[in-house]
Amino acid sequence: MSETARKELQLAFCPGCGTFLQKAAIAQSEMICPCCGKDVVVSIKNGKVIVFESRRESEQDPEYMMRVRAMTYLNRMRKAK
Ligand SMILES: [Zn+2]
């Protein structure tokens, strides 16, 4: 049964708007909420989920803005299905 606990998937939600972000047993990643565009850090380990807003000053970075737009677009496509 210990294997079940190890593989148990945790859900991570956006701290700003509550949108589902990621499902994993172990994760450490930075992502952008497809709903509100917040830059968040997702940390999942030992059955605990920590999601917090990343306060990087990257809003003026054009590459970052393109990433936000691309993800927002992707999310719209998914919702349209
Ligand atoms: Zn959000």
Image (tube, helix red, strand yellow):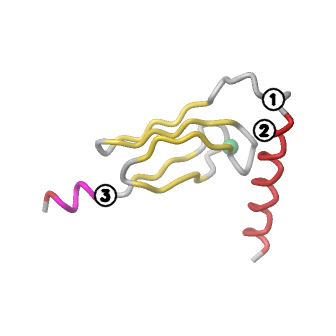
The answer to whether 13 appears left or right of 10 in the picture is right
Residue 18 forms part of the magenta stretch: no
State the separation of the CA atoms marked 2 and 1: 7 Å
Magenta region: 3-7
Q: Position of residue 5 (x, y in %)?
A: 22, 56
Q: Amino acid at mark 3?
A: Glu
Q: Main secondary structure of the magenta part?
A: helix
Q: In the rendered picture of this protein, how many numbered marks are placed on residues? A: 3
The quarter of the picture showing ligand 1: top right
Label 3 sits on a secondary structure element that is loop
User: Within the image, what quadrant is residue 55 found in?
Assistant: top right
Q: Which residue does the image show at 37% across and 57% down from the upper left? A: 9
Q: Which residue is mark 1?
A: 59
Q: Which residue is mark 3?
A: 8
Which quadrant of the figure contains the C terminus? bottom right
User: Within the image, what quadrant is residue 64 found in?
Assistant: top right
Who is closer to the viewer here, 65 or 35?
A: 65
Q: Which residue is mark 2?
A: 64
Label 2 sits on a secondary structure element that is helix
Q: Amino acid at mark 2?
A: Tyr
Residue 74, disc: none
Crowd rating for badge 2 (residues with CA inside 10 Å; few <14, some 14–19, many 20+): some
Mark nearer the N terminus (1 vs 3): 3
Mark nearer the N terminus (3 vs 2): 3
